[in-house]
Image (cartoon, grey):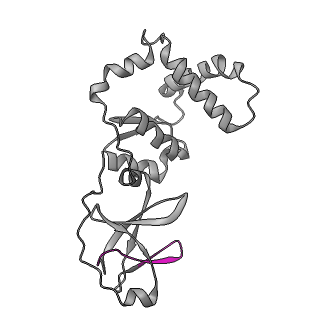
């Protein structure tokens, strides 16, 4: 879900508000934290209220009736996703919609001047990482996922925020007071004992990205 959410924001820009179902995918830690960092208001449909989800249910019905009946022989989920994207971009978004009496893409472009697109870089990617708090020891070390890391700057005794991608747990980014401190360093007891770490100075890229 977080990958689909991220792809949508890169492609169509950052909305002011999101309206989601109450499923576990839509209430995940990554979704909630990303919305806070991007200043997106997050609302959920009332439980067991079908009318509150009428628009998306109508889309699903149209998707079944106009797309799935024509594509019954796909052989993989990847192929289905490719066909779905082509159908949405080249058919659904370019045909007049009965509810708005115009093409969805044309309606979207009416507000193009209000759309704020995300920059595609490593710092923006961190907006979508999950975040956990950790207490730094008096030797500037913290533990996460049963491994020990040293902070990139002197944060002894502080409570830090550690961001990471659940699917790529080899990089852990240290934040303190919503400021990016840098990438955590895998602990080498001998080498790290010889090093002196600078005092915390945030990198030019802050912890909040629009």
- Residue 180 location in percent, x, y? 31, 63
Q: How many marks?
A: 0
**Residue 2 placement (x, y as % from top left):** 50, 46
Image quadrant containing the C terminus: top left
Q: Find residue 136 and report its image quarter.
A: bottom left
Residue 44 seen from this side = no
Region in magenta: 142-154
In front of the other: 113 or 144: 113
Left or right position of 198 against 102: left
Whether 156 is drawn above or below 19: the answer is: below
Identified at 47% across, 65% down, the residue is 171
Residue 109 point in image, percent of width and height: 35, 21
Q: Nearer the viewer, residue 197 or 38?
A: 197
Left or right for 108, reference 165: left
Q: Is residue 202 above or below residue 109?
A: below
Q: Is 192 located above or below residue 133 in the figure?
A: below
107 inside magenta stretch: no
Quadrant in the rendering for residue 66: top right
Q: Position of residue 5 (x, y in %)?
A: 47, 41
At 46% from the left edge and 84% from the top edge, which residue is drawn? Answer: 188
Q: Is residue 60 above or below residue 7?
A: above
Q: Residue at x 65, y 17 (%)?
A: 65
Q: Nearer the viewer, residue 76 or 175?
A: 76
Q: Is residue 7 visible?
A: yes
Residue 33 or 128: which is nearer the viewer? 128
């Amino acid at each position: 879900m977080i990958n689909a959410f991220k792809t949508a924001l890169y492609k169509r820009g950052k909305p002011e508000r999101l309206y989601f179902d109450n499923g576990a995918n839509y209430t995940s830690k990554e979704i909630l934290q990303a919305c806070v960092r991007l200043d997106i208001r997050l609302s959920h449909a009332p439980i067991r209220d079908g009318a509150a989800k009428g628009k998306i249910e109508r889309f699903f019905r149209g998707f079944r009736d106009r797309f799935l009946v024509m594509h019954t022989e796909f052989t993989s989920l990847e192929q289905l996703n490719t066909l779905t994207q082509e159908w949405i971009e080249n058919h659904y978004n370019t045909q007049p919609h009965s509810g708005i009496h115009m093409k969805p893409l044309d309606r979207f472009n009416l507000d193009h001047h209000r759309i704020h697109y995300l920059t595609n870089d490593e710092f923006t990617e961190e907006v979508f990482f999950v975040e956990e708090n950790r207490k730094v020891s008096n030797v500037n070390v913290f533990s996460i996922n049963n491994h020990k890391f040293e902070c990139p700057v002197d944060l002894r005794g502080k409570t830090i925020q550690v961001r990471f991608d659940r699917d790529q747990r080899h990089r852990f980014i240290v934040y303190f007071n919503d400021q990016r401190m840098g990438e955590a360093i895998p602990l080498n007891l001998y080498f790290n004992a010889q090093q002196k770490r600078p005092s915390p100075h945030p990198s030019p890229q802050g912890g909040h990205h629009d």
